[in-house]
């Protein structure tokens, strides 16, 4: 038993050290002032997002990119709250801003993938960028991506996402958890093993999407419009898949407002893991689950006198320290404060939360945008 604990801990530590090294390997990209050359089609799928759209629309209207070099394509997935009318009302104040609102054409089990496909079929420009209706973007967002494209040969660009409006303990927990995902994402790109990205800030050539046949082969899975396309791109041309580590490129999104919404979101994310084609992605998911599981089971083993308490404490301390190194590095990039007391408290709660999500995702459905999907 102790040997198994040592092996799992050793593998986990090696993985996080690799991510830390990869994170450092990806250099920060500073937006270079030059003439804008890239034309973008920004794709935003939405369903009942009237409470969030105003912030997004305001940020889009403040973009400092030439207005004739991008279009915004909204795809309405059967909204019932007047979201489309809100978009029209807001954006008609900016007559030079080109936008359209399409109705989603459902052809699969994945509304989000159908919406993106619907938009791309009408997109006029060479580069597609997806983001979400509950996000806000930096005013140099497109400038940063354009600058990167001009200086790098690539087909796919993953870019950073962070939370804002962190005004409760639950949201602070999500904030730390999400930053750890960002650290692992950037680290994976740095060690040439990209396995994760976020559709709230994801760019790719339209011709690449068409060449890869879009979401064909995984549109039976409700989510995963980002990761499964990334996997296809990595398999096709790994050197053409890049990460843009730029503060100007950060897209901000809101954490979940309550615990049930958080559980539903994380179950949706967990449901994708078993469908990964990336062996490395599956290994990461298994290693993280196993590490958290042994910490949970370790308590039972200590109570039944099978495992000495000092060994369980040692494993927890090792995990907490190694996680903090990558997390602190990620916090610095996102200009976020790192609270040691809150981090330690979260580290105690996190194994229980992670194992609970993994297990419930196997045996129950999840809700997303008012609809129920099979996990």
Image (cartoon, grey):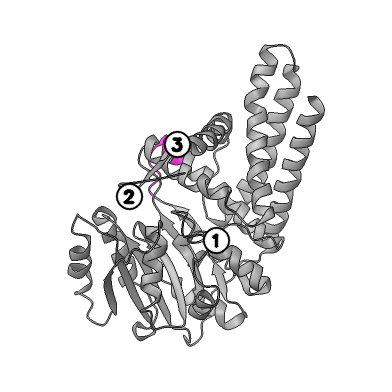
Q: Residue 48 has which mark?
A: none
Q: Position of residue 134 (x, y in %)?
A: 35, 56
Q: Is residue 58 left or right of residue 352?
A: left
Query: For the residue labelled by badge 2, is the local secondary structure a helix, a strand or a loop?
Result: loop
Please say whether residue 260 is one of the residues in the magenta stretch.
no
**Horizontally, is 81 left or right of 274 in the view?**
left
Residue 277 coordinates in the image, percent (x, y): 63, 57
The disc at residue 369 is 2
Q: Is residue 219 left or right of residue 183?
A: left
Please name the residue shown 69% across and 52% down the image: 20
- Who is closer to the viewer here, 222 or 194? 222
Please state which of the two labelled residues, at mark 3 or mark 2, is closer to the viewer.
3
Instruction: Say whether marks 3 and 1 touch (CB < 8 Å).
Output: no
Q: Residues within 10 Å of mark 3 (few under 14, many from 20)?
A: few
Q: Give the mark, 3 or 1, whose residue is nearer the N terminus.
A: 1
Label 3 or label 2, whichever comes before in sequence order:
3
- The mark that comes first in sequence, 1 or 2, is 1
* Secondary structure found at label 3: loop
Q: Quadrant of residue 338?
A: top right
Indicate whether 48 appears above or below 294.
Answer: below
Local packing at callout 2 (Cα closer than 10 Å; few below 14, some 14-19, many 20+) is few
Give the magenta range. Answer: 165-172
Q: Mark 1 = which residue?
A: 228
Disc 1, SS: helix
Horizontal and vertical percent position of residue 308: 76, 17
Asked which quadrant contains residue 43, the reply is: bottom left
Disc number placed over residue 364 in the picture, else none? 3
Q: Is residue 320 visible?
A: no
Q: What residue is at 24 percent from the left and 56 percent from the top?
A: 50
Task: Please tell me how many numbered marks the rendered image carries.
Answer: 3
Between residues 65 and 284, which one lies in front from this camera angle?
284
């Amino acid at each position: 038993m102790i040997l198994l604990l040592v092996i799992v801990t050793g593998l986990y530590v090696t993985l996080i050290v690799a991510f830390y090294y990869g994170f450092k390997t990806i250099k920060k990209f500073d937006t270079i002032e030059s003439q804008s050359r890239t034309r973008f089609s920004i794709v935003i799928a939405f369903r009942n997002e009237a409470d969030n759209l105003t912030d997004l629309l305001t940020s889009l209207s403040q973009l400092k990119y030439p207005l004739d070099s991008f279009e915004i394509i909204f795809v309405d997935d059967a909204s019932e709250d007047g979201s489309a009318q809100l978009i029209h009302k807001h954006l008609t104040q900016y007559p030079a801003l080109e936008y359209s609102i399409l109705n989603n054409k459902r052809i699969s089990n994945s509304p989000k993938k159908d919406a993106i496909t619907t938009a791309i079929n009408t997109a006029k420009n060479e580069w597609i960028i997806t983001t979400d209706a509950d996000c806000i973007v930096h005013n140099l967002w497109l400038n940063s991506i354009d600058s990167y494209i001009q200086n790098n040969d690539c087909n796919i660009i993953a870019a950073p996402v962070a939370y804002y409006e962190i005004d409760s303990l639950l949201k602070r927990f999500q904030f730390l958890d999400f930053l750890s995902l960002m650290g692992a994402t950037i680290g994976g790109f740095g060690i040439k093993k990209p396995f994760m990205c976020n559709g709230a800030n994801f760019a790719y050539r339209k011709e690449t999407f068409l060449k890869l046949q879009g979401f064909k082969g995984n549109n039976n899975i409700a989510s995963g419009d980002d990761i499964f396309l990334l996997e296809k791109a990595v398999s096709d041309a790994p050197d053409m898949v890049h990460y843009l580590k730029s503060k100007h490129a950060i897209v901000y999104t809101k954490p979940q407002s309550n615990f049930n919404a958080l559980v539903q979101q994380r179950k949706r994310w967990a449901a994708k893991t078993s469908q990964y084609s990336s062996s490395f992605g599956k290994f990461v998911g298994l290693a993280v689950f196993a590490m958290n599981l042994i910490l949970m089971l370790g308590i039972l083993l200590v109570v039944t006198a099978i495992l000495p308490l000092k060994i369980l404490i040692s494993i927890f301390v090792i995990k907490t320290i190694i996680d903090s190194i990558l997390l602190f590095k990620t916090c610095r990039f996102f200009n976020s404060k790192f609270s040691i007391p809150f981090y330690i408290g979260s580290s105690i709660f996190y194994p229980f939360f992670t194992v609970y999500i993994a297990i419930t995702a196997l045996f129950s459905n999840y809700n997303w945008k008012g609809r129920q999907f099979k996990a």
